Amino acid sequence: MKSDRAELQWKREKGSSIFGGAPMTHTGKEAGLLSRLKLLKGYSPGKRVLSIGCGTAAELRLLREQGLSAVGLDPERSYLLEGKAKDNAEDLIQAIGENMPLRNNVFDLVLLFEVLEHVINPEFVLKEISRVLKPNSLVLLTVPNRFYLFETHGVQICGRQINNLLGVGIPFLSMAPNFLRRGFERARVYSEADVLSLLRKFGFDPLAVEYIMPSLDARKQTPLTNAIKQVILSSSKIPLVRRFGSNIAIISRKKTVASDAHQELQAFQGP
């Protein structure tokens, strides 16, 4: 099912834009949900899970199959209706991550899969995550890796969208400095240091960092993409090569006491 919605777009300061992303069920990466959830093996996150930017809520079905209580949140109503139609899911909320209509200290685990790069304000989202998480609870997030060789979100130039080249991405654009990317990027990219700094600022202790290699399963199968996929599969066993993976995954734990920066922002924003 394809949505006929207008693409979500938010203006940032200085006039540049950030665009909403498509859920994994629309990009062909739904299998990637399992690999992301497997990163939690060995942890005991508890029963209550919140997935921010859940799209059609495919991960909620997987979580419920494991006996967890899962809630999904997304700003795009058409995606939530699609998820409800597929799985008869009831615990879906239309809202943005910067302002979640949820109580404090409710959840044991928050999931943020390829979402932080699309939000209006990443800092406000992390503040809200800290608010709704119980102390000592977990957040698992994944973001695009700045050092991946391809920009996979395309670019926006003079109101025109330029999509990925050869079904792989735009070479080397993800590595460009922010001041060059900012005017035409459709989504942010992050280094490991960027994400760790943000997490620590808002009272999270990073526990594990992983790099996720691209599957290319969503791409048109051609001799070129098949050859690239084989190279990626072979080279992904090398630790140094993995650091150039398409996504960074980080598991963090909320501290019992919020950081000074978090408290200052909370005081500035008010209750």
Image (cartoon, rainbow, N blue to C red):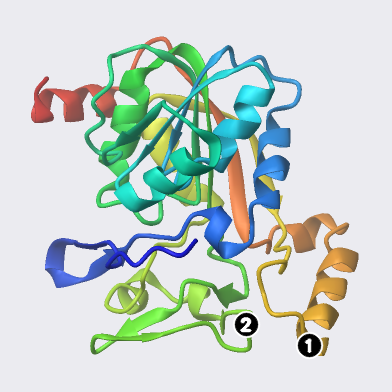
Answer with left or right where residue 133 lies relative to residue 239. Answer: left
Q: Residues within 10 Å of mark 2 (few under 14, many from 20)?
A: some
Residue 161 place in picture, x, y as percent: 36, 84
Can I make out residue 76 in this image? no
Instruction: Verify CB contact (< 8 Å) between mark 2 and mark 1.
Output: yes
Q: Mark 2 sits on what residue? A: 167
Q: Quadrant of residue 251?
A: top right
Measuring 53% from the left and 61% from the top, which residue is drawn there?
Answer: 26
Give the CA separation, mark 2 to mark 1: 9 Å
Measuring 40% from the left and 50% from the top, which residue is drawn there?
Answer: 79
Q: Quadrant of the C terminus?
A: top left
Kind of residue indicated by mark 1:
Leu
Q: Quadrant of residue 133?
A: top left
Kind of residue indicated by mark 2:
Gly
Q: Mark 1 sits on what residue? A: 224
Measuring 28% from the left and 21% from the top, which residue is drawn there?
Answer: 102
Residue 9 place in picture, x, y as percent: 25, 64
